[in-house]
Image (cartoon, helix red, strand yellow):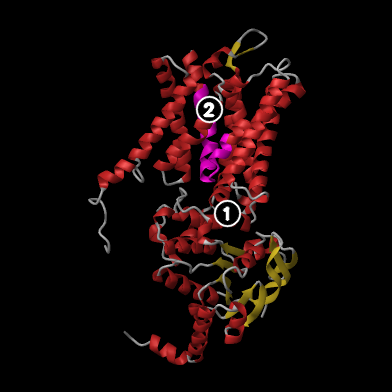
Amino acid sequence: MNAFWIILTGALVATSCGLLGAFLILRKMAMVGDAISHAVLPGIVIAYLLSESRDVLPMLIGAAALGVFTTFMIEFLYQKARLQIDASIGITFTWLFAMGIILISLYAGQVDLDQDCVLYGEIAYVPLDLWITESGRSLGPWPVWILSGVLLLILLMVLLGYRGLKVTTFNPEYAAAIGISTVFWHYLLMSAVSVTTVVAFESVGAILVVAFLIVPPATAYLLTEKLHHMLLLTVGLGILIAVSGYYLAVWIDGSVAGAMAVTSGVFLLLAVLFSPFSGVLTQRFRQKAALVPPGE
Amino acid sequence: MKTAIETHNLTVAYNRRPVLWDIDFQIPEGQLIGVLGPNGSGKTTLLKSIMGLVQPSSGYVRLFGQSLDEVRSRISYVPQRESVDWNFPISVREVALMGRYRKDKLLGRLSREDHRLADEALEKVGMLPYADRQIAQLSGGQQQRVFVARALTQQADLYLMDEPFAGVDAASEEAILTLLKDMKQAGKTVLIVHHDLHTAHQFFDWMVLLNTRLIKCGPTASVFTAEYLKQAYGGQLTILSQVSDLVKARDFPIRERSFKDQPK
């Protein structure tokens, strides 16, 4: 049963992160996802201190607020202060993450939270965090319930907002010209990324979150020519990675999150080599034979 | 004639440097209008401020006598080709269908009629055979034609196009030109940012000549003169000498045309 819960958790995180990550990489904002996933730390700590509990809701609100603040700060440094975009991202998230660390160390006595748990949250512990009803019945692990809720929200957003996200991602100027608010869709996406990373954090750790945000969508990007195919393939890959990563971890008796992240890299490598469109080896095999001579 | 676009004291600045200064003009409906001027003269900015994409420091724009929000569905905008990533996973048809996206109906399904209009627009620009291709597989001119098709799909009355002829092959130029003439026939107004003086006086009925300030706005014959072009292009000598040639050539349009129309 443990294996089932761990794989399910991995697949839920992979699906949520992958759907959002697809839009992030198409907007050339993959590293913003990385930045948000670190910069929400002070938000979690502040919410923790204010609410004096480890309830999910205050933490989500704190994290989402910080996530949106992160995107504000990046935009501000980039647009107003005229720094390069990558420099703006680097400054913002290291600074906010460091603020989080200071907060944790200041209130270490009162806060039952440490960097390790945030950065390397352990997916293998998921089956231990059970939701037991008052009558003593177990409803399965907490994280699975919360992650399912988040996934549902993201599915709603992507399905209902598909056209809005698509047009503001592909051609923001045109979207604005037909009266669609690019700012709204930008911050909607960023809030979703913030909430998802925070929820996923606790159960799988920051590194796997970032891996799931970027690697499966990037792999799907190499293999497809249409956005909805890219999204579907991202989801499929995410689930495949969760399953194969888990069994890799069992086989080598190592970290589950690490194994999943490594597996995602292997799939990406395969796509880089064998993609029917841009694969390095595919193109070499094809060479001239498959080319159409000019003028025909 | 009714007025399609009018601007009043339109001033736009980026970082306190004015890009457009006190622009005042009126353009009638049903014309092909060229916006001309040297690099950095504010041509693209003019289009963007008409489309509400940049905020003017002062002044305002009226379209068909109303504000942009009241007539947005009648206006269609074709941004510069460089404004999008052409490696985006999207097909030609999907781009054309974006012309049917509306602010207030982003949710519901696109209708059969929407698909028909998109295909019809692709047909008009000769891109229907490529409808299922990913946009990365097109040439620059074909990409431009897809952008024009998206604008046509919108079924607007006023079209604002930013450099649709830039880096376009001869076939695409021909296709777009023919289309523009059809659009004019149908009573549409088309405002086009254009950089090539050589073709400008053949393409347009009406011109807006800019160099941060408005140099002149009016029918081509009254704008495309050595005097105004000199004012717009200032000391750019190479362009000036070309301009005088062009103006001379324009003085003998009959002979020019008779050469062109000779059967091959």
Q: Position of residue A196 (x, y in %)?
A: 60, 31
Residue B144 — which label? none
Secondary structure of the residue carrying tag 1 is loop
Categorize mark 1 by other alpha carbons within 10 Å: few (<14), some (14-19), many (20+).
Answer: many
> Label 2 amino acid?
Ile
Is residue A11 shown in magenta? yes
Q: Nearer the viewer, residue B251 or B38?
A: B38
Residue at the location (39% across, 16% down)? A252
Which mark lies nearer to you, 1 or 2? 2
Q: Nearer the viewer, residue B181 or A184?
A: A184
Subunit bearing disc 2: A
Res. B102 in view: yes
Q: Position of residue B112 (x, y in %)?
A: 50, 54
Secondary structure of the residue carrying tag 2 is helix
Most frequent secondary structure within the magenta stretch: helix
Q: Residue at label 1? A: B101
From the viewer's perspective, is B11 left or right of A120? right
Res. A60 in view: no
Q: Which residues are magenta?
A: A9-34
Rendered image quadrant of residue B92: bottom left
Q: Are marks 1 and 2 in contact (CB under 8 Å)?
A: no
Residue at the location (61% across, 83% down)? B228
Q: Is the residue B245 above or below the residue A194 in the image? A: below
> Label 1 amino acid?
Tyr
Q: Residue at label 2? A: A207
Categorize mark 2 by other alpha carbons within 10 Å: few (<14), some (14-19), many (20+).
Answer: many
